Image (cartoon, helix red, strand yellow):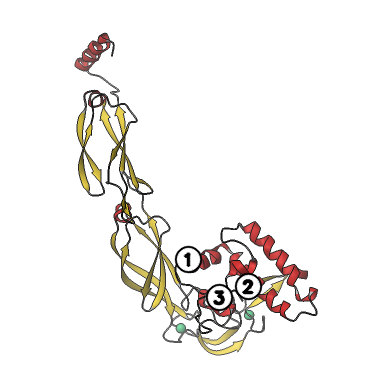
Amino acid sequence: MTKDLYEILGVGESSSPDELRKAYRDLAKKNHPDANPDDPAAEERFKRISDAYDILGNPEKREQYDLMRKGGHDPFSGGGGEGFGDLSDILRSMFGGGGGSPFGAGRHASRGTSQVEIEIPFVTAAKGGTVQRVLRLPVVCRDCKGAGGSGRETCTSCGGAGRISSGQGFFTTMHPCANCGGRGYTLKKKCSTCGGTGEVRSSEKVSLRIPPGASDGTTLRASIGGNPVLVRLRVKTDRFFTRQGRDILCNVTVTAAQAVLGTTLMVRTLGGKVKLKIKPGTQPGTVLRMRGRGVVHNGVKGDQLVTVVVKLPVELNKEQRSLWTEIKKTGS
Ligand SMILES: [Zn+2]
Ligand SMILES: [Zn+2]
């Protein structure tokens, strides 16, 4: 039986929220236990479908699930029967939480995979390099070992399920129980260290290797204090450079005389300043290609594309005015 949530709903991984909703409704209707009184497996199928939609129908959970799916943290690889027992185990491992319900706690992942976002400079992303950052992560509270306190009692509101259904008919929706915060139990005495959440924030300094050609949204895997962490990169904009795949784009400004007579400029590149020749008669908007000065990705070098901007004088002094007048007389 597949444990891939997209396969369970019979949709592609790029399906829209509407497509997901429709697939879920169709399947839920077909497999609802009430509609299949003679098929005992229907209830299990119905539960799997609902569980899958609980994740994929929630944009945040879906993003986290997609990351794990793509990031090599294959939640489905159980090997030969070892590893995850069923869907609930997978979801619990992803979204944390104990108690009766895999979704219940919905807390971040002190017991699953945490995700953090860091900002890196444009040039570091383009060239690759190493950055050091202090990351703050939720980790299991040592004082209560994640229990949140002592005197655990089954929640009287949800009966330990961690969630409460509302609505009628086929499409009841489930909400985390407010009384127990989705844990399924309440505590007589809360842990004073973590305030009953079972986790505390821990800061760790980490060194991350940024691969050349990293871009916004690139996700790296790291391990912090033994906990797997997904680090999502946000690339800062640069005043001078922008990027288009492997190519680096920039503008240079020259005067009218430099464009007409030609000149040599020193232009910033990823590897420092480099000479660039502007030929006589260069037109505004001309794009000059500096070969091999772009991003190196998978062994292929991009270029730096330089757009020439020509700045015309706004105010002229007496001498300049007479010179431009002379030029005008020549008809060019
Ligand atoms: Zn409850
Ligand atoms: Zn604690």
Q: Is residue 168 visible?
A: no
Q: Disc number at residue 91?
A: 3
Q: Earlier in the sequence, mark 3 or mark 2?
A: 2
Q: Secondary structure at mark 2?
A: helix
Give the quarter of the figure containing the N terminus.
Answer: bottom right
Q: Residue at x 43, y 58 (%)?
A: 217
The amino acid sitting under disc 3 is Leu
Q: Disc number at residue 70?
A: 1
- Does the residue tagged 1 have its C-beta within 8 Å of any atom of ligand 2? no
Task: Assign ligand 1 to one image quadrant.
Answer: bottom right
What residue sits right under mark 2 in the picture?
51
Q: Residues within 10 Å of mark 1 (few under 14, many from 20)?
A: few
The amino acid sitting under disc 2 is Asp
Q: Is residue 317 above or below residue 25?
A: above
Q: Is residue 198 above or below residue 301?
A: below
Res 161 → quadrant = bottom right
Which residue is nearer to you in this view: 130 or 119? 130
Q: Secondary structure at mark 1?
A: helix
Q: Is residue 119 left or right of residue 130?
A: right
The amino acid sitting under disc 1 is Lys
Q: CA distance from mark 3 to mark 1?
A: 16 Å
